[in-house]
Amino acid sequence: LVPTRVPVLADHPLVQGPRFRRLKIGAGHRLDVKASGVFVLGIGHGNKLLTDLYNCHLTKVYTVGGLFGKATDDFSDTGKLIEKTTFDHITREKLERILAVIQGTNHKALLMYSNIDMKTQEAYELAVKGLIRPMDKSPPIITAIRCLQFALPEFQLEIHCLHETQQYLRKVVHEIGLELKSSAVCTHVRRTRDGVFTLDDALPRTQWDLRSIQDAIRNCQLKVETEIEKTLGHRDNSPVHQLDVQTAESAE
Amino acid sequence: SFVKPDAGWKKPRRIQPTPYRLETEEKISSAACGYGFTLLASNTTDITKVWGTGLNKDSQLGFQRSRRDQTKGYDYVLEPSPIPLPLEKPQQTRVLQVSCGRAHSLVLTDSEGVFTMGNNSYGQCGRKVIEDEIYSESYLIHQLKEFDSRVVQVACGQDHSLFRTKKGSVYACGWGADGQTGLGHYNITSVPTKLHGDIAGVNIIQVSSYGDCCLAVSDEGDVFGWGNSEYLQLASVTETTQVNVPRHLPFKIGKIKEAACGGTGNAVLTEEGNIFVWGYGILGKGPNLTETAVPEMIPPSLFGWSDFNSDIFVAHIRCGLGQFAALTNRGELFVWGKNLRGCLGTGRMEDQYFPWRVTVPGEVVDVACGVDHMVSLVKSF
């Protein structure tokens, strides 16, 4: 006796109907209309992982493009023009100096909002590893900022930040322009990394179909789990751990 | 000034916990902090080259004529006041560096040697000790010229003075009970005498001292130490608590560029830009490390180094009595140590156990640390 499978009409997709009738989709960190880049979504049971990822407070990386010489009311190049200035005196060196100052003040804010007692050995060890981060609500903090390209009047910056909004980044560009005794507007904001999700993991518009989504979820699962383990695992052990195991199984 | 503020709405303060801008008439090129007083010097060719403020009970700021009584002088100077120096060519000589000790100060000029003023009860001013000399309201400023070559750096310890000449030799005078003069005996020296020991024949490029211990760096990157070793500063070569002859400190941490000697702890800066600390007190590696005889490195990530910013390194290191200050190549100032009366400039009154960035509105070019105050020279953006 050999078991064989015979095609049955009941298995046909047109008889069964669509696989997914309703999907619960939740969004990760906000990305506004004028910006582009990585946008994390959670499907179904993955929404619980979304809250855990939010509590991890991981940094996001943006590529911000700016233009010297103009100042508008909403700090981007599509807004109402307020003033025009000269910018020939600006050099890459001056820009880098301003960026160093921004980094320094934000570094201090980082240590202050992380609410750790500076006198403990634990605080020293976390500071060495660079793991001191504000684990609660805090104003936007820039952990690192660097100039990628500089060709007057345009320039491009790479910004690593926490708890920010894209409008805040545009405001930072405007303030850099003011510090350099000129003015600047932001031309584009592109998120290149959101916690553990990079541009390589992200799906472009052409790949928004079931197969690629399933593959993408499977690829990222391990990374997300390890990150949550690392950051939240040592804080409150049992409930989060069990939840992770459940979500991993149900996501499959 | 603080006791008499410059604007009507500012109230006099006892403690200044964050950096405060001091307006000066000339561009200041060198600053030094002593035990309760500060000296600021500029390398101009005008007649006033040095200003001083603070304690003047031993005339460490020269004779400050009192405005109320022309015959008497001030014992406390409340704002930077010019110090008259007896120069032969006041319109040509430039002041290169100033240095302050507990109650004496040294002014280094480019062509007229070293001028010393202040307390001389241990011969630290380089002149003969006069019994029962009254140091306050004294006009005496001594000039030192007899060295084997031009003096290029001066450093003051608590009650002794060190001079480094162009040929690379070191001279010392002053109190020697802890062996800090390095001349082989524990008596006081009132005339600058050349040091021998492990330094003889070595070209020294930097000397540093603030308390009773001294460090010298040679051009090959070796560090030599002498003086007090009660806090394990020289425990790597000897068990005794006082060393009166310069000894080579065999540390295998790489070529050393700069050394800084504090009251109880020492720090060195290597060629790669790393800081190594040893001694006793708050050394900068957390509250658990209070004393060590072997230099320990401070992780560069505390100064802003990361995989993202890998070209940040420390350019200079300075020591006060219980604090350390480090300047990075980006012009940032990091401080750590005992925060006596808010001297670290962090804005808090607690001690700082690991390097912490001080917010200064400009690029920090140089910093001088004292017992309970610090002065930094800043270039604006």
Image (spheres, rainbow, N blue to C red):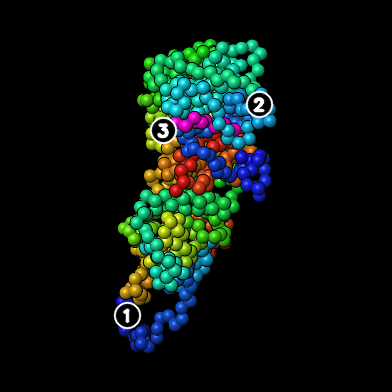
Determine if residue B67 is in view: yes
Tell whether position B51 is magenta: yes
Judging depth in this view, the residue of A193 and B119 nearest the camera is B119
Q: Earlier in the sequence, mark 2 or mark 3?
A: 2
Q: In the rendering, which numbered label is found on residue B270? A: 3
The residue at 63%/47% (across/down) is: B7
Q: In the rendering, which numbered label is found on residue B40? A: none
Mark 3 Cα shell of 10 Å, populated few (<14), some (14-19), many (≥20) = some
Q: Secondary structure at mark 3?
A: strand
Tell me the quadrant of the picture where the N terminus of chain B can be found.
top right
The spot of residue A94 in percent (x, y) is 39, 51
Q: Amino acid at mark 2?
A: Gln
**Marks 2/1: CA–CA distance:** 118 Å
Q: Which residue is mark 2?
A: B70
The spot of residue A40 in percent (x, y) is 43, 68
Q: Amino acid at mark 3?
A: Thr
Residue found farthest to the right? B68
The spot of residue A95 in percent (x, y) is 39, 53
CB of mark 2 within 8 Å of CB of mark 3? Answer: no
In magenta, the rendered stretch is B45-53
A205 with respect to B5 (left or right): left
- Quarter assignment of residue B270: top left
The residue at 54%/37% (across/down) is: B375
Determine if residue B350 is in view: no
Mark 1 Cα shell of 10 Å, populated few (<14), some (14-19), many (≥20) = few
Q: In the rendering, which numbered label is found on residue A5? A: 1
Tell whether position B59 is magenta: no
Q: Amino acid at mark 1?
A: Arg
Q: Secondary structure at mark 2?
A: loop
**Marks 1/3: CA–CA distance:** 76 Å
Mark 2 Cα shell of 10 Å, populated few (<14), some (14-19), many (≥20) = few
Q: Chain of mark 3?
A: B
